[in-house]
Amino acid sequence: MNHIERGLEDLAALVAIQSVSAQGRNLPEAADAVTKLLEAEGFTVQRFAGQVAPILLAQTGNGPRTLLIYNHYDVQPESPLELWESAPFALTERADKDGTVRLYGRGSSDDKGEIAVRLAALRALKEQHGGQLPLTIKWLLEGEEEVGSPSLEGFVREHAADLQADGCLWEFGSIAPSGRPVLIAGVKGCVGLELRCSIANSDLHSANGAVVDNPLWRLAAAVASLRDANGHVLIPGFYDDVLPPSASDLEAIASIPDESAALQSAYGIKSFFKGASGQRFYERYCLEPVLNVNGFHGGYGDAGSKTVLPKDGFVKLDLRLVPNQRPAQIVQLLKAHLEQIGFPDIEVFETDASLAPARSPLDSAFMQTAIAAARDSFQLEPIVQPSSGGSGPMGPFVEVLGLPVVCAGISNHQAFVHAPNENIVKAHFEQGFKFALTFFTRVTAM
Amino acid sequence: MNHIERGLEDLAALVAIQSVSAQGRNLPEAADAVTKLLEAEGFTVQRFAGQVAPILLAQTGNGPRTLLIYNHYDVQPESPLELWESAPFALTERADKDGTVRLYGRGSSDDKGEIAVRLAALRALKEQHGGQLPLTIKWLLEGEEEVGSPSLEGFVREHAADLQADGCLWEFGSIAPSGRPVLIAGVKGCVGLELRCSIANSDLHSANGAVVDNPLWRLAAAVASLRDANGHVLIPGFYDDVLPPSASDLEAIASIPDESAALQSAYGIKSFFKGASGQRFYERYCLEPVLNVNGFHGGYGDAGSKTVLPKDGFVKLDLRLVPNQRPAQIVQLLKAHLEQIGFPDIEVFETDASLAPARSPLDSAFMQTAIAAARDSFQLEPIVQPSSGGSGPMGPFVEVLGLPVVCAGISNHQAFVHAPNENIVKAHFEQGFKFALTFFTRVTAM
């Protein structure tokens, strides 16, 4: 069995563990499985208690350079189950109509695929060097990423000395529709909120709607007030702390090839906001904050109709922030806005620990090493983005540890992360393996 | 066993049949059970096919006067099941903290309780007259009322000659918190709608919210645009056809004792719209149209958070109309409004057959007979309302048959019709029995 085959076997074993952090499922089991894989490769693994799941800090190798790798072994909930075409926790190979072979399963991309491909590359590197890694690898893995990494910032602060390195390889990254590798130097922040509205102590006959207010109308009006039809956030003060993009940010954005048409087709949508494409599309995606509705539930939802005035309802939101927006400040602004426009009764709860936005410089030696490794292993020019549209707990790595960070990995534009039918393209696993091996080698000589 | 005990036994048997029309459950079985009960009392029962459930037209008795009774044997869905304190389809006696004994079960009030109490009174009347009813009773029962009575108007038109009578006793009615009987001469119309919005062919990672619109935000903004925080409908043209209240409507409204404080406490709400009470409360409740949100569903709804951009969502609405609003016209106005404000992609479906609003005059001999019967049997002055806040297929009875109609029955302000823990007050069954017996007797001599 070669390194790729063995890596895919590791991936299948990890996907089979239903480590859903939002529901506290199988997190110690997943930590055990990862520990076993790392120890088999000579890592010393320390295990720390997190608020939701164990934190693992593993170390092996020896050399002039030290690379910190960050991943997470938890996954998003699999619901809605009925939209999966194969069992979410069984890694399943299936070919697209166009012949692309994919591996489906929750965590195949986010983030167990990245763990497996990096481990496979470390095995190959060790083999190339007579069983000894020529650099120090520090691998930090948590099981709380999908619930906002509530323990991570404290852990990084407490273990800052142990986590020192020449740079950090982030948990995710992707390969563009064109096949070019994507390297990313930052993430958006994220605040997860739930709005709740309760009117009566019981559902009522809807005839009472003539005299009794409706919690679902109140929630709808509150949600409607938060942004406009183009996604522009209407909470007063929301944009006050947003840093204008730097010249190098805009230069990087301008050099991103426009793949918005492929995304539009893959997602099956009619248009992006204001028909955005090209530079404007990537400005929005990488550099602008967002307010999203993740879920809205209340009242009757079965077949037919029910003339009921529901007693209550709730809405789940996420707000993705950019430097220098501060999560706590944004929550205060949102609460003040709801109060101001006549919804003081709508309760606002934070569903997850918040994440601060973070950006790492594009011109560091570490980033340039990643760019060279990507160019070398893919034989294609990498796409460099100043920030992901997604979020992650990168803040303390940049702010506390002062590390350059790069996101590089094997996700794809149809990976359906956080959604049914999450997958990786099987060929990307081999490409990601080659990139990681090249990158580790180049970091050694950095 | 006396007539009351036997009536309650009939009620328990009817409640046990899960005749949920919205879900097409057990409708022929419920029609069979009603037929058996009627035939045992000498009724000739004709059975006709409706679109959803059988329509029964039963007749018995002989005399100078003919009374048409209208009821329905279908019920609302029992969900949410977890909020019921006893099984919804098992009639269960339980005392309130204040000692009021109630009978709980789906349909106990709406509408099986009314069927059982009227049948009990007819048994007593027959007994008083040596086994022969002194008036003709025509009893029309359907099983589609809770889905908007899609077959009834056609049936009434087709069988208009068979349905001629001196007046119609409507399916529902209630006893006020003060113990005074409530008599009602009309109903609001009702339109049930579902709004649907779909954006993508799959749920997406919410990072895409920077460039992809959100179906739940669009639905929320659409719903928010339909009315204001005081329940005033904002659809252009919505109020154009509303008839101003007549002098006799306003006189009746002014004579309704203000029981809004008792309702507010029973419902556990902080305030009615604009703090309405007294005459303003009853004007809104009886005479003004309403737009209600019955349900709103889309995206993640389980514990914790999921950073997903949902592919779609839906909202269920009902609009309760007053004379002379026309359901089809209102649906057109709503669609035009959504198109006008930038939501042409939100699809609008009618979930039920619509019901037209209807009002019967307050000064008819038939209404005056009901008022006298209520005064006589309760020894209290009845409360007379020009219209219910609720709806029903009264339109063809008033418009096609030209009948005076009165609503009189045994529901109560804490009956939770259409909601969990639907009930009647046990003592009301006996009071309702006495009223019905008195009313039938007075109609005979009308």
Image: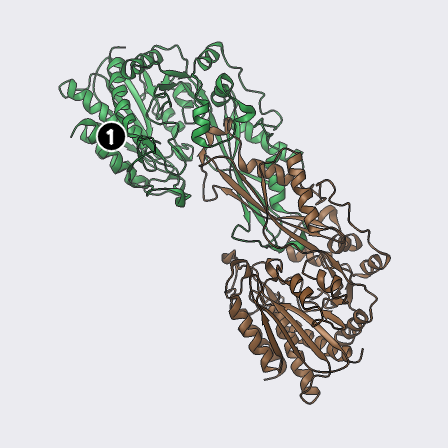
Chain colours: A brown, B green
Position of A71 compared to B114: left or right?
A: right
Give the residue at x 71% y 87%: A129
The quadrant in which the C terminus of chain A is found is: bottom right
Residue ranking furthest to the left: B130
In this rendering, is residue B332 above or below A258?
above
In this rendering, is residue A237 above or below A112?
above
Q: Disc 1 is attached to a residue of which chain?
A: B
> Residue B115, image x and y in percent?
29, 29
The quadrant in which the N terminus of chain A is found is: bottom right
Closest to the observer: B330 or A197?
A: A197
What is the crowding at mark 1: few (fewer than 14 residues within 10 Å), some, or many (at least 20)? Answer: some
Determine the secondary structure under disc 1.
strand
Residue ranking furthest to the bottom: A130
Q: Residue A119, can we see it?
A: yes
> Residue A357, image x and y in percent?
72, 56
Residue ranking furthest to the right: A247
Position of B193 compared to B126: left or right?
A: right
Give the residue at x 41% y 13%: B361
Give the residue at x 22% y 15%: B63
Residue A374: quarter of image: bottom right
Position of B445 compared to A205: left or right?
A: left
Q: Amino acid at mark 1?
A: Val
Q: Residue A425, can we see it?
A: no
In this rendering, is residue A435 above or below B14?
below
Name the residue tied to disc 1: B45
> Residue A279, image x and y in percent?
80, 55
Residue A424: quarter of image: bottom right
In this rendering, is residue B52 above or below A428?
above
